[in-house]
Image (cartoon, rainbow, N blue to C red):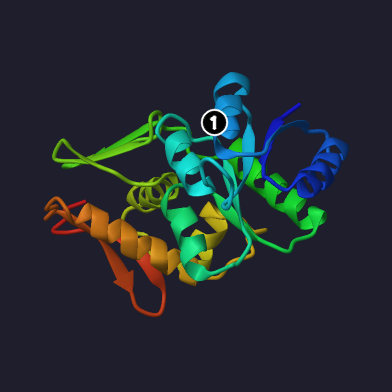
Amino acid sequence: MSKLLIVDDNQQITSILADYAKKNHYDVLIAYDGEAALELFQTAQPDIILLDVMMPKKDGFAVCREIRQTSNVPILMITARGEDFERIMGLEIGADDYIVKPFSPGEVMARIKAVMRRVQQDPMNQQQLTFNDLTINLENYTVAIANEPILLTKKEIDLLWTLASNRQKAYSRDELLNLLWGFDYFGDTRTVDSHIKRLRSKLNQVPHPTWEIKTIWGVGYKFEVLDDEN
């Protein structure tokens, strides 16, 4: 039975979500503030986390950042306002999905199941990819260019891995959205564009003259090898 950690200071919301989660065969843990969430994360090692943004002691962003220092456990963030900057912030620091209040418990369970399916069916069996000066390691989720570490979120690493492991293949935005966020994702292709923009910005901190992530107008993106003889 998978362990779900629900983190929200609204006890009515946690009670409703916990009931639905138990009916869907999850072992439920509950925390009402950020510090308690981190303690439960350390002691119980949940399989997935539902994390509210606005909480006492530590907000959801701070909790997500701390968890991402040591773990790639799936995290779904909850935001009350639904403003773009909050959703972008959550994805930027490593959240796997976001949910906007008000929501239905059924929608939350559908999102949780979708994320869990993607984790359980992850096709990336190989743990490390090396191409010229680029190294991507999925065992510890690190990326380096010319031995210089590049700090990326989990989703950015997954995106880079997908492109780099299929070099010269052009992916449409819809393909990347479905591969990395899943068919059940309730977003749009602008999510892909924003992640590509941030990924490029971080990768460009270190020169990499033999490859680039190229925009293919009218199609999407590809990992292009420059002067590749293969």
Q: Position of residue 66 (x, y in %)?
A: 44, 36
Q: Is residue 54 or residue 92 the one in the foreground? A: 54
Q: Is residue 18 left or right of residue 84?
A: right
Q: Position of residue 57 (x, y in %)?
A: 53, 40
Q: Is residue 48 left or right of residue 161?
A: right
Task: Please say whether residue 191 is visible from this viewpoint.
Answer: yes
The image quarter containing residue 98 is bottom right
- All told, the count of numbered labels is 1
- Residue under label 1, please give it: 38
With respect to residue 215, does 129 lie above or below? Answer: above
- Category of crowding for the residue at label 1, using alpha-carbon neighbours closer than 10 angstroms: few (below 14), some (14–19), many (at least 20): some
Task: Please say whether residue 222 is visible from this viewpoint.
Answer: no
Q: Position of residue 55 (x, y in %)?
A: 59, 47
* Residue located 61% across and 39% down the image: 33
Q: Is residue 48 or residue 222 the one in the foreground? A: 48
Tag 1: amino acid: Leu
Q: Is residue 166 left or right of residue 37?
A: left
Q: Is residue 205 left or right of residue 141?
A: left
- Callout 1 secondary element: helix
* Residue located 14% across and 54% down the image: 210
* Residue located 38% across and 46% down the image: 157
Q: Position of residue 208 (x, y in %)?
A: 14, 52
Quadrant containing the N terminus is: top right
* Residue located 78% across and 33% down the image: 26
